Image (cartoon, coloured by chain):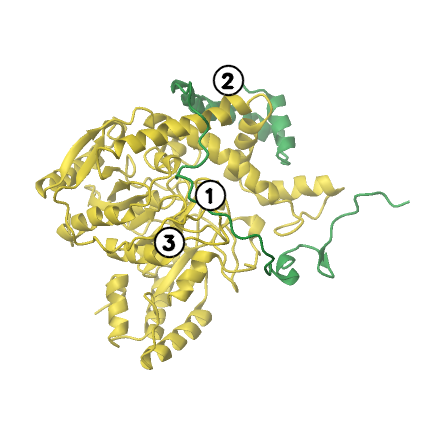
Amino acid sequence: MSITVDDVKKLAKLSRLEFTEEETQQFVKELEATLKQVEAINKVDVSGVDLLESTIDADTQLRPDVVVDSLPVEQIVLNAPDKKDGAFLVPITVAED
Amino acid sequence: MNYLDLSLTQVKSALDKGEITSQELVKLCFEQIEKTKDLNALNSTYFDLAMARAKEIDAKRAKGEDVGVLGGVPIVIKDNINMLGTKTTCSSKFLENFDSPYNATVTQKLLDAGAIIIGKANMDEFAMGSSNENSAFGAVKNPVDETRVPGGSSGGSAATVAAKQCFASLGTDTGGSIREPSSFCGVVGIKPTYGRVSRYGVVAFASSLDQVGALTRTVEDNATMLNVLAGADKMDMTASHTPVADNTSKLNDGVKGIKIGVAKQFYTEALSPEVRDNLQKALDWYKESGAELVEIDLPSLDTALAVYYVISSAEAASNLARFDGIRYGVRAKDYTDLVDLYFKSRTQGFGKEVKRRIMLGNYVLSSGYYDAFYRKAKRVQKVIRNEFLQAFEKCDVLISPTTASPAFKLGEKANDHVAMYLTDIFTVPINIAGVPALSMPCGKTSEGLPVGMQIIGKHFDEPTIYQVANAFEKAHKGGE
């Protein structure tokens, strides 16, 4: 599997990460090396095998659908880099007229 | 007597008998933390909080009240587990100042059992790594040999127990992150069955593979810790409702008649000769002690690492998408608009290995590659899991080396991520199959480095793992 500089740039954009040209070049090599290792999955015959949904036999249970207390607002915004009156503050995303 | 030399079980007994108070014990632990601080095992410590709690527990104990099975015992938790009043950093710059908004279920269970949480352990950033060199707060040194890595990602959790800074710690294990460091530092560590322990309040890496487990100095201590941690949780739907068996119930049952599976795929040419010798001696001992060795075939085992890197990276990329600099974590200062804020915050906040996993994860999930990688890996996962289920029709446990080689030198693999990933070759299949496994010391190399033995059990059959492990530990106490 060969990886191009454009592939890495596209992935970086999807990942919301920025890389220098040098880092991008390095990622081309690294991703290729990792994908070569990952190709081992093609050695296994999976014809007739479904996706694994859970490693343990499903013994999970849904909880009753009743209203319970959730975390208080102060705890939710506790770590916000910027906040006001119990809300998260973000940069303006719609232009002011 | 130095109380720090005692096991958790022994020191709890000393506390109960009034030989020492919890406050004295906390002070001893902090003296030891100071003496061994060069290890860099802990990201934070809480002396005042711990002393206040120890005082409370001492008072309760003096009045004859129930103080819990861990009453007054100093314990450390990994820094990806939330605890009110403390930071949860995941050893990442992104979360350097993150205040825990609530207690993780495992934290609450420890506190309810009377534990005194004295600090949080260093780790690979977001639990991604096998050497603890990916921490934003510096590498951890191995207490056995400070020129070597302690393993990862729970490197601090293993080092703090091995260095006798505390009596037990919590780690998390997605592909070997409890067992590999346990092996490298010579302690006992368990990765329980997927779903045995709640993940609520534990920062997610790969949600379908992550489990919390304990690291201790003895097998009995470990079983005691799992008894405290295990069980269903209304806050985590994947925490299993399968009843929790008493993990200490079969500790002294011996191994007569126990069927031990030996799969040749675990004893490859990659094994260092000294690891091979120590494992062979352990298997010989089990046979002499009345266990039956059964040959097992796990034909797809060598593909587990590839499956692991596809699935864990895909889940990591999705889980880490929430780190956007809006609701918590570091927000970059010099952005032009909202999208630029995301780019800059993530680029500045995440370390190199984390970015590598996000990129790989998004690659295998992206259009055109999803079927070839992600869906394929999930199907191969089923094949591997079924091979384990079939193996357990013929044996009670499987025994393998935890790692192919003992602890490597700091820096040795830091620039070769493929070599680093290969470190986990024997531990990742366990998470892929969802079964439980414990690593314990089974000898030392000529250089004095611990060799780890991995005992793998059936889903939810941790008591049998502890039975098999304790028999070996009892027979080899104080030496090899």
Q: Name the front one of labels 3 and 1.
A: 3
Left or right: B101 with respect to B4? right
Neighbourhood count class around disc 2 (C-alpha, 10 Å): few under 14, some 14–19, many 20 upward? few
Q: Mark 2 is on which residue type?
A: Met
Q: Residue at x 53, y 30 (%)?
A: B360
Check residue B36 in the rendering and tell me which mark sits there, or answer none.
none
Determine the residue located farthest toward the left in the rendered image: B288
Q: Gap in Å between the C-alphas at discs 3 and 1?
A: 29 Å
**What quarter of the picture does the N terminus of chain B occupy?**
bottom left
Left or right: B252 with respect to B362? left
Could you tell me residue B258's position as x and y percent? 16, 41
Residue occupied by mark 1: B134
Q: Mark 1 is on which residue type?
A: Asn
Determine the residue located farthest toward the bottom in the rendered image: B63
Q: Are marks 3 and 1 in contact (CB under 8 Å)?
A: no
Pointer 3 and pointer 1 on the same chain:
yes
Q: Mark 3 is on which residue type?
A: Ala
Determine the residue located farthest toward the right in the rendered image: A97
Residue occupied by mark 2: A1
* B189 or B333: nearer the viewer: B189
Q: Quadrant of residue B282?
A: top left
Residue B242 in view here? yes
Q: Give the mark nearer the N terminus: 3 vs 1.
A: 1
SS class of the residue under badge 1? loop
Q: Indicate the colour of chain A.
A: green
